[in-house]
Image (cartoon, rainbow, N blue to C red):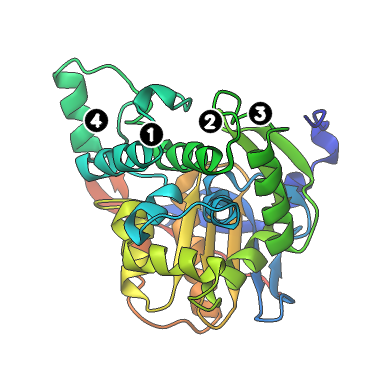
Amino acid sequence: MTPPQSSSEHPLHTAPVVAQVDRSGFVESVHHGIVAATGADGGLELAIGPVDAPMFPRSSNKPVQALAMLRSGLDLPDHLLSLACASHNGEEFHREGVREILAGAGLTEDDLQNTPDRPIYPPERERWIAEGLAPSSIGQNCSGKHAGMLATCVVNGWDTATYRDPGHPLQVAMADTLADLAGEPIAATGIDGCGAPVMAISTAGLARAFGRLASASEDTPEGRIARAIRSHPDYLGGTDRDVTGLIRAVPGLIAKDGAEAVYAIGLADGRGIALKIADGNQRARTVVARAALERLGVTGDLSALDPDPILGHGDPVGTISPIGHDA
């Protein structure tokens, strides 16, 4: 693991303002962040803030981690491959999909090691609470990834009990694949919220990786990941999720949201976008993502990225809006 950095040396402290919150015509808050866009050749086309500084992409790494599973011999139908890339809602079809991945590998829910939780989809979470259902690994949003990791271990004869160890062959393959697509070495390794390792790359590297996924031929493992996400965005997120709505609305686009306000987008022409809101507040990431897409000339219905209004006494009284910067 990487030793902690002192606050005075961290690049996030230098990130510029990328969004502001207005209430009743008055600027109430601002959000700092980093935004990178890369071209089909992997070169930078947009750079706001320290785009070469490493950060944890959190769940935005998942499509690349799923690519490592494919490169290691895993074979899943598209809907289950999308689920292996997912931070899913925990709806019934998500949970059934996880069970299908596990059963195909001769495993059960008991083999999952991700942190138990209730579904994140509010109606389903409220139902679990009302019925007194305990948090479980299969209900937690990373269970698709963990099921895919376990199935990959079975294909290769790797130990399933230690699959979360950073030195496990599976995690080494994931780190190598992420470094390959990002075009840079892994800068740090930590523990994600689900208990699996999370690898740090730069915002520019994350954008580059998603551009490469989105533009790959369908007969490649990279192209299979992109096809699965495009054809089954409901398995990637779920009902009412902005990432699912965005993928459905813009032909050829793939995307993945991540904790601590990370968003990664790949376009079919090979361009990639990635952003990190410095304070981790999720409310700013969608408006900044939309602004980046519009700046790159992406057209289509981007309403899935519309922010929630700022309310006063239950009525809209303000907005969250992007703040532009020169590249």
Measured from the top left, where is residue 212 in percent x and y? 61, 71
Is residue 131 toward the left or the right of residue 21 in the image? Answer: left
Quadrant for residue 97, please give it: top left
N-terminal label among 2 and 1:
1
Q: Which mark is residue 125?
A: 4
Nearest-to-viewer mark from 2 and 1: 1
Front residue of 76/121: it is 76
User: How would you rate the neighbour count of disc 1 (Cα within 10 Å): few for under 14, some for 14-19, many for 20 or more?
Assistant: few
Name the residue located 52 percent from the left edge and 55 percent from the top edge.
Answer: 63
Examine the rendered structure and indicate whether residue 78 appears above or below residue 302: above
Q: Quadrant of the N terminus?
A: top right
Q: Residue furthest front?
A: 157
Measured from the top left, where is residue 326 in percent x and y? 70, 74
Secondary structure under the numbered disc 3 in the rendered image: loop
Do the residues under discs 1 and 4 have CB atoms within 8 angstroms?
no
- Amino acid under disc 4: Arg
How far apart in space, not on screen, are marks 2 and 4 (Cα)?
Answer: 18 Å
Q: Quadrant of the C terminus?
A: bottom right
Name the residue located 55 percent from the left edge and 53 percent from the top edge.
Answer: 73
N-terminal label among 3 and 4:
4
Return the residue at label 1: 106
- Amino acid under disc 2: Gly
N-terminal label among 2 and 3:
3
Do the residues under discs 2 and 3 have CB atoms within 8 angstroms?
no
How far apart in space, not on screen, are marks 1 and 4 (Cα)?
Answer: 29 Å
Front residue of 291/140: it is 140
Return the residue at label 2: 193
